[in-house]
Amino acid sequence: MDITEKDFERINSSKLYVPLKEQGLHSFVFDPIYDIRFFGIEKLHPFDAGKWGRVYNKLVKRGYINEQHICRPREAQYDDLLIVHSKSYLSTLQWNVLIARIMEVPLLIFFPACVIDRKVLKSFRYQTGGTVLAVRLAIECGAAVNLGGGFHHCSSKSGGGFCPYADITLAIKFLFAQRLVEKVMIVDLDAHQGNGHERDFLTSTDNVYILDMYNCDIYPRDVKAKKAIRKAVEIKSQTSDQRYFSLLKKALDEAVLEFQPQLVLYNAGTDSLTNDPLGKFCCTDCNGFQWRLSKK
């Protein structure tokens, strides 16, 4: 993964780390703007565009976190996005037809791109800023969580699958440019293959190790991107808890032993849970899942 002189300049002038100085060190990153409200049209996609706020509210209700644990992210600006995306790609996000394809909501073609930007893409830019911030917080605090982000279908050159910005790649470029770490492991447990970051790190497998556990029967089936995966765990629809966790533990043990990362970027997907219309798995043991990861 190349980091140009211009990238260094943009990273050094970026404001995405500013909340650390303004707000202090907190383990959770979230802003209510994460939730997408677009005249109800967001409900036409099976992806829950309001899940981030609901996750936050449940964590608060159950006493796991409160407002004092939250760090508010900055919105990723155009110059921030140019660290990972080309000007030509960002210009396509001004065309409502292409935005509709990326977001998989055909009705968006009937709305001006400026309205879509304000009502939809702005949320994703805040979440992108949140991923960059959370990764830096993890360096400072030992662990951190962005309650949004994880747009693993977006590469530097192309968006798709409800993912318009390559936040994972961007966060890692920040780390490498500032020499905060040298080896990063991506553990991607979304039910879909993370073809976006995989395409970005095709030539960076020495310092970026990707463990991707996904349903090989569903989107995106990206054969080229698979070449970047150092530890691929392909499983079928209707996979149960016992089978899932057995394969996950084995893969994690092998990956950590092989690579010995300095930082692990975990991309969590709720679509591995039972009855999810997209992931098609049958995982129900949420508490067991949390316990198994914590033991790692």
Image: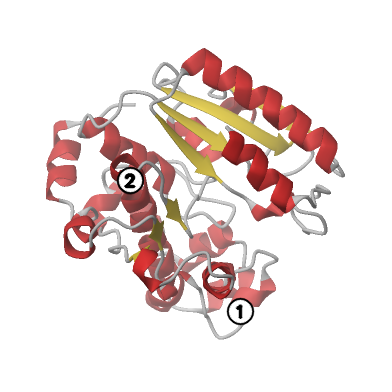
**Number of on-image labels:** 2
Left or right of 39? Residue 118 is left
- Provide the residue designation for mark 1: 41
Residue 230 in view (yes/no): no
- In the image, 136: left or right of 157? left
Q: Quadrant of residue 12?
A: top left
Q: Which residue is mark 2?
A: 141
Instruction: Answer left or right for 68 relative to 246.
Output: left
Q: Nearer the viewer, residue 190 or 23?
A: 23
**Could you tell me the amino acid type at mark 1?**
Ile
Q: Position of residue 85 (x, y in %)?
A: 34, 45
Q: Secondary structure at mark 2?
A: helix
Residue 258: which disc?
none
Which x, y percent locates residue 289? 69, 45
- The residue at the point 63 percent across, 41 percent down is 189
Q: Is residue 219 left or right of residue 30?
A: right
Look at label 2 and name its amino acid. Answer: Cys
Give me the residue at 25% from left, 32% from top.
180
